[in-house]
Amino acid sequence: MPTHRSTARRFGSSAALALLLTPTALLAQDQSSAQDASNGQESGAAEDQARDEAVPLVPGTPTWDSFHGQLNAQKYSPLDQIDADNVGDLEKAWEIHTGDVSDGSGDLPPTVWSATPVFANDTLYIGTPFYRILALDPATGEEKWSFDTESTLEAMTQPALKSRGVAYWEADDPVEGESCQKIVYLGTMDAQLFAVDADTGEKCESFADNGVLDVNQWNDTNNKWPLSLLQPPTVVGDHLVLGWAGKDWAFEQAPPGTVFSIDARTGEREWTFDALPEAMREKSGTANVWTHMSADEENGLVYLPVSSPSPNYWGGNRTEEAPLATSTTALDVDTGEVVWSRQWVHHDVWDYDINAAPTLMDITVDGEEIPALVQATKMGFLFVVNRLTGEDVWPIEERSVPQGDGSVDGEVYAETQPFPTKPAPLLDQSEKPEIWGLADAASFGQCSALWDDLSYEGMYTPPTTQGEGTLAYPDSAGGVQWGGVAFDPVSQTAIVNTSHIVQYVKLYDRDAYEKADSGSGNESGFAPQEGAPYGMRLEVALNWLGMPCWEPPFGELVALDMTTGDVKWRRPVGASQQYGFFMPESWGSPTIGGPAVTAGNLVFIGASMDAKLRAYSLESGEELWEDQAEAPAVSNPAVYEYEGREYVAFIAGGNSILKDQVGDQVVVYALPEDE
């Protein structure tokens, strides 16, 4: 385990994800939904007793004051007013429509809205993809105030206007009568970070330049794009730990992935962290942190999920070691020094960014209490390590991996990659996924022909210039997306949603690329990797009817016992949709966004293609409640209590990567007031 003591995504185009509904398809055999339900039911009484004795995760009235609910990224609420017995009575308490939405048909780019509602200061704070902040009454949705950044609404680094919302900070020692003792922060695509008073919505004049920090002032190497602030800062004490998003697949040389620590009050830069070695920064780039981070405040650590270097699918310009790229890296939050780091993909040429904040948890393994961390990955792996040292909880093995067919010049592939022994992979990458007989028959063998022409020797088969390319499974969007892992600390159960998507990637030398390039969709199609000797093409493996060539389910919800690393249950999640019709739920759906878990033995999740919101039993995986939203809720839900009533809030904003359906809906649920 290397120890150091020194110093956006994609399922292919929406058309590609459209799953064809046919009468024959409806005859497909139903796949099992929940497994081992009886085991969960037998342990339920003991867990209920433990909950009565457990100390609440947040003292006093529970809040949901960060992107993942808490800094540990557990997405857990100690509230139990809504439980498995009464969740079926859940009703809409209120909803609003922000008006900040575009389908791309007019003058504005389409919107992608993945914000988590933030509940703090007796207020629900929302950040929109038009870069506005809304402060809402948590019981009624009535607007308290709003703030407009008046940002330029251009798709500078992304194919859409995109926001994952706001961050919240408050002083430990507020000065009476002074403004901005509580602050809400919102970043923009053009790299401006706004700080406004959480009570009034007025800009905090003492923060940076009259309430606005220009993060792009530090974009001083390979300045190809602004350092887009699409993910809200991670607030750790008085630090704002800030990553940024860039532009995938576009350039060989790109801005290197610096993380900044900012003083929450003043906006002054405190420290910086660079994932790439000095010698690699100018000739490569990225290895940025574009998603949220997690933190262990008691031990002064912040955990960075670091992405891959550029260009994504060719690494001949960066054959030397870059041990902090595609890693989980723990930093001292006060100094930015690396405490430990684990690299999960060596010499990443698959765009396997570490795309989710690691979830921190205390677990009991073989009678030993372990301060653990679980890192979900695009590969469908869950790596579990001691969060203080980075050492394995269950063995993580270096195994030999394919070395390519020799068709790509300049490459020096890693001979081994890390594989966890527990938990088992969430999806099987050892062999080509099974062809879906229905899709193959409907396309007169098109899927079989494609499979025959795709290279695949198992996980980590390198990209090729030959045939139709290399089969990519899991795909570059990930077996697990940025919603990450939720955790119930009482039963020590982890919950994670996973997508099963097959893509294929092909590299083209520069002349062939210029002839082949026929454009690209949202996160699919051709991309230049400008400056590199190879451009590339990435496609979802579909037949001419738009049907997936691989067998369902296309998405699942999985529960794991973190005392053993074993699966407790797994079931398809959501339903795929086309032309207004839902597929059988046994086929599941790809998902964007993640789950929340509560002390009421419930798992809440949107995330699916059918734009439904659901509650599942934590113990058995049984679906207990659902409602229809106006667009896929590609975000994490929030759970909060206000004036003695428990609420569950969703943002239904949509993402055209998943489906051509966008929305501007904030919808909040509670039990009827007479219950």
Image (spheres, grey):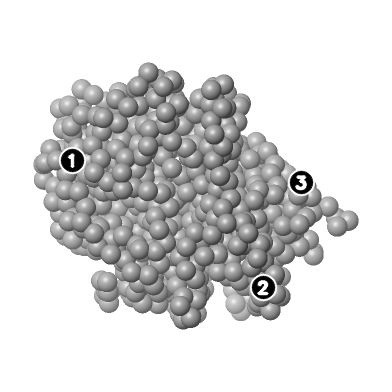
Type of amino acid at the residue the image marks with label 3: Lys
Which sits in the foreground, 277 or 562? 562
Mark found first going from the N terminus, 1 or 2? 2
The quarter of the picture where the C terminus appears is bottom right
Label placed on residue 92: 3
- Residue at the spot of label 2: 46
Type of amino acid at the residue the image marks with label 2: Ala
Asked whether, in this view, residue 197 is left or right of residue 214, the answer is right
Type of amino acid at the residue the image marks with label 1: Ala
Quote the CA–CA distance across marks 3 and 1: 52 Å
Where residue 511 appears, x then y in whole percent? Answer: 15, 27
Camera-nearest label, 1 or 2: 2
Asked whether, in this view, residue 152 is left or right of residue 197, the answer is left
Q: How crowded is mark 2: few (under 14 residues within 10 Å), some or many (20 or more)?
A: few
Camera-nearest label, 3 or 2: 2
Does the rendering let one see residue 130?
no
Q: Do the residues labelled 3 and 1 touch (CB within 8 Å)?
A: no
- Residue at the spot of label 1: 532
Q: Residues within 10 Å of mark 3 (few under 14, many from 20)?
A: some
- Whether residue 24 is situated above or below residue 658 in the rendered picture: above
